[in-house]
Image (cartoon, rainbow, N blue to C red):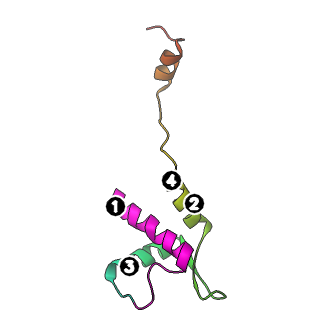
Amino acid sequence: MNGSQEKNLIDALKKVDAHGDIAPPHVHDPVIMILRERAFQAHLIRWDDIRGRYVLTGAGRHRISARDRTAAVIMRFREREAKKGGLQE
């Protein structure tokens, strides 16, 4: 999934969390329907019979919070040691 698709999915998940669905029920836009189906198939949302709306699963909540974190930098072992001053080449 590229960056814009991921951003659209995260925005859709935030709408589910706030309103119970990605868009109002009367909206039949194909993009909205695809986003809803992708989120459902990826187990990011589920239908709650008691509330009568979609709710986020734990994976969906994790997906939203993971998006806000910065990416970690992976360094090779030798580079890390060289920066500490412990490795002489």
Q: Which residue is mark 1?
A: 4
Q: Which mark is residue 32?
A: 3
Distance (Cα) linking label 1 and label 2: 19 Å
Tell me: 47 left or right of 76: right
Label 3: few (<14), some (14–19) or many (≥20) C-alpha neighbours in 10 Å: some
Taking the spot 38% from the left edge, 87% from the top edge, the residue there is 27
Q: Which residue is mark 4?
A: 68
Question: Which quadrant of the figure has residue 43?
Answer: bottom right
Query: Residue 8, image x and y in percent?
Result: 39, 66
Residue furthest to the right: 50
- Which stretch did the figure color magenta? 2-26
Q: Which residue is mark 2?
A: 62
Mark 4 belongs to which amino acid? Answer: Asp
Q: Looking at the image, is mark 1 or mark 2 earlier in the sequence?
A: 1
Q: Looking at the image, is mark 1 or mark 3 earlier in the sequence?
A: 1
Of 26 and 77, the residue lying toward us: 26
Residue 19 part of the magenta-drawn span: yes
From what the image shows, is residue 50 above or below residue 39?
A: below
Q: Looking at the image, is mark 3 or mark 2 earlier in the sequence?
A: 3
Mark 2 belongs to which amino acid? Answer: His
From what the image shows, is residue 80 above or below residue 40?
A: above
Residue furthest to the bottom: 26
Distance (Cα) linking label 4 and label 3: 23 Å
In terms of secondary structure, what is the magenta stretch mainly? Answer: helix
Instruction: Report the quarter where the C terminus lies.
Output: top left
Secondary structure beneath label 3: helix
User: Are dots 3 and 2 in contact, CB under 8 Å?
Assistant: no
Mark 3 belongs to which amino acid? Answer: Ile
Taking the spot 50% from the left edge, 76% from the top edge, the residue there is 40
Taking the spot 49% from the left edge, 45% from the top edge, the residue there is 70
